[in-house]
Amino acid sequence: MCPSTFSSSSDSSEYTMTASIRHNVSRSGRLLPLMLLSLLALAGCGGGEDTESLPNTGTTVTNANYNGPAPATDDVQNFKRSVWDNLVSTNRCGSCHAANGQSPAFVHDGDINIAWAQANTIVNLNDPSQSLMVTKVAGGHNCWLSSDSACADTLTSYIATWAGGSAGSAKTVELRPPQIKDPGATKVFPADSSEFENWVYPLLRNYCADCHVEGIQAPFVASDDRQLAYLDSQSRMDLENPASSRFVERLRDEFHNCWEGDCTTSAEEMQVAIEIYAATISTQPLDTELVASKALTLTGDGLLANAGGRFEDNVIALYEFKTGEGTTAFDTSGVEPALHLSLIGNVDWFGGWGITVGPAFLDETTGATVRNGKAQGTTTASRKIHDLFTASGEYSIEAWVVPANTTQEDARIVTYSGSSTTRNVTLSQTQQNYEVLHRSTTTDQNTAFATDGNDMRLQASLQHVVVNFTPGQGRRIFVNGEDTGDVDPSPAGLLNEWDDTFALVLGNETDGMSLWEGSLQLVAIHNRALSAEQIRTNFEVGVGQKYFLLFSIAHLIDIPESYVVFRVSQFDSHGYLFAEPFFISLDETQTPQGIPLEGLKLGINGREAAVGQAFATLELSLNSTDYTPGSGQVLSTQGTIIGLENGPDSDEFFLSFERLGDNENVVVEGSLSLAPVPADQPEAPSIGLKTFDEINASMAKVSTIATTHPPVAATFNTVRQQLPSVENINGFLSSQQMAVTQMAIQYCDALVSDTTKRAAFFPGFGFSASAQDAFDQAGKDLIINPLLAKMVGTGLDSQPEDTALRTELNALMDGLSSCGGSCASDRTETVVKASCAAVLGSAVTLVQ
């Protein structure tokens, strides 16, 4: 780790814990320990022929041969295997922190026991993420990857493995006071993009359009769609400090795509354009009447609250998507070789840690639909999945997913495969089902094991899904912490027939033929199956970027070091989630004595948020009865969402109160104007549609065929999304009629194919007679009469006339049975099925 020299000596005050608290919050209706990070003030230390060939995005670790003294203890051996072996190479830390290099010599290549002793001065085994070794690298010190955060996460994994892995235990909380600053008016991106188009967009369009447009590479800051370019550019421009804009940094510091080969001039030109644009945006001062807390930003002042608590002892590939930019999703599991993924095609970063794959789009030049989005690893790095899975004989694939819709089919979420038809294992979506395709000694690689279609497990919302495989139980699927109960129809088998030439892919197949549209917020590959309890724990821990914001209110009440604390996360690319506020003083000798608190509101960028004020009705007292020193007092167990404006690095938040202590800002809500008298609407139809389940039940009842009859059930699951879902007859579509017709055909086919049921339904009809003989008028009546009696019914106020129905059915049978004297042997059955379907699929069973 070069070139700076480590200093293992630190002021002891840097390690002082200002307050150690455990705070209970509500989650899913239960009280669980609130897990917070220990935050320190250290400066950081810191055979598939169809498989697409990709550049190797990993870094090869070349371990030096160790010939020194043997490890003195098991702990030293664990250190060597988990940390030293991964860092001793000269392209990581070995060129500086070895035997004759800089202190500390934590990769001493002459004596592993010395290296162990030196490493202990710069690691925190209780909280690996806060190790000086980690935070130094997180600050930009000799990262071997293109992302400092990815290097820091990888180091954290190394140290956690040395310490014994992540056991999912709750961590003691250490809250530290933030920098105190007053809320101020800040600039906010206007809805109108015209000034952006005048100043910044021309540079992006001229110099970035070869890459940053739809279908090539996100973000689409140079898109021909100017509004899209504006939206994607906002998080990359700092209106308060244009020199800190990501656009400027990429040119000035990272020499990214500088025009005319001059990065300094390019960066200056971009900075000036952003400065001119920012000058066109005015600000309004903070309302002096507000009773306001001090101000905070999310990433600058928040205390990172992703403290772990997850079970990750056997993770061999981990994707948390923290980078937020670039074309690589880093594997931060710490298990070498690192299986980094290249983001290809239509893939974008998802705000709050994640990636979004798709959607498919129309190429206007070729007229073809492009479905090329995916994140793919190399076959070389992917081989570790083969090696470690076949060695253990079991696995878990865990993902936090947000499907874009519930209609896509054969859409690959996570796959280790060679093409659309060759694989080792795949987690896939088919409409509202999760499916697992898996190669073993007892299963075909393309036969799906799926969740029950009637359960509709897959929803277009954030879900936690885990696929487990063990030789004892085979495949199991867990959704949101619960076993779906679906039973693997195949014996478990072994994994020793897996192919080691495949690649890991997210969101598609290697050949790009099975696009999944949606977002991924975490993917973890485990080479041991998680237990049901561990899966439940990982679900309850949640996912995404989380912070604790400590809003200072000590200037408003007579209690030093007093704060209202919120758990805050970037909910998605458009909003923030503020949840579960509590009051606390970091001076544990203090206790509130009857301090009124009313009307808490969230403020952003110098004004109260227009929406999302879920805490505005709070009315309570901060008092000793409800307050516990070191833990605080719960204000609410609820959460709310407010809109993102400038981005998590720039948006400034504060709280305001209608009453806090002796301070008041009584808000008088404006009177509501009377709503206008609504215009008379057209008279609603007196009839409506049956919905999908009602249609299915009606057809089963009148046809005498059970809904569970396999061909019927399969057809219903296929067309369920296409059937009417609301009763409004004005919304009936031709596509829905096609689905109804398919259902009617399947029910009638089952009825006529069953000799016992058809004899009971159509008594006396000669099914063995030829079509020419069977459908004389007497024969036709033997079909028509039961259909009208059992499917149409009698005595309704509004229904078709029997005469009209008989005329239509007679004409249908005459036409279908006239085949020039050469009808097929099964023509009679076919005519009866068609007549049955014509009635069953008509308005008589669809309308109510």
Image (tube, rainbow, N blue to C red):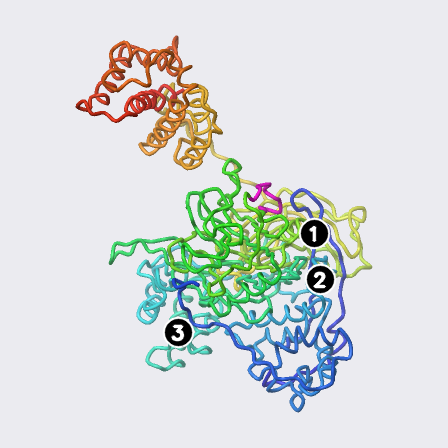
In the rendered structure, does residue 479 fall within the stretch colored magenta?
A: yes
Q: Is residue 716 left or right of residue 143?
A: left
Which residue shows up at 38% across the image and 9% down it? 794
Q: Which residue is mark 3?
A: 272
Name the kind of residue labelled 2 in the image: Leu
Residue 604 against residue 380 in the figure, above or below:
above
Where residue 316 sits in the image (x, y, percent)?
A: 59, 64
Q: Which residue is mark 2?
A: 175
Where residue 437 sits in the image (x, y, percent)?
A: 49, 50
Where residue 242 sits in the image (x, y, percent)?
A: 45, 71
Q: Earlier in the sequence, mark 3 or mark 2?
A: 2
Q: Could you tell me which quadrant the C terminus lies in? A: top left
Name the kind of residue labelled 3 in the image: Val
Q: Could you tell me which quadrant the N terminus lies in? A: bottom right
Majority secondary structure of the magenta segment? loop
Q: Nearer the viewer, mark 1 or mark 3?
A: 1
Q: Nearer the viewer, mark 3 or mark 2?
A: 2
Residue 351 against residue 620 in the figure, above or below:
below
Q: Disc 2 on helix, strand or loop?
A: loop
Q: Residues within 10 Å of mark 1 (few under 14, many from 20)?
A: many
Q: Earlier in the sequence, mark 2 or mark 1?
A: 2
Q: Residues within 10 Å of mark 3 (few under 14, many from 20)?
A: some
| Numbered range of the magenta stretch | 478-488
Q: Which residue is mark 1?
A: 582
Residue 171 against residue 432 in the figure, above or below:
below
Q: Residues within 10 Å of mark 2 (few under 14, many from 20)?
A: many
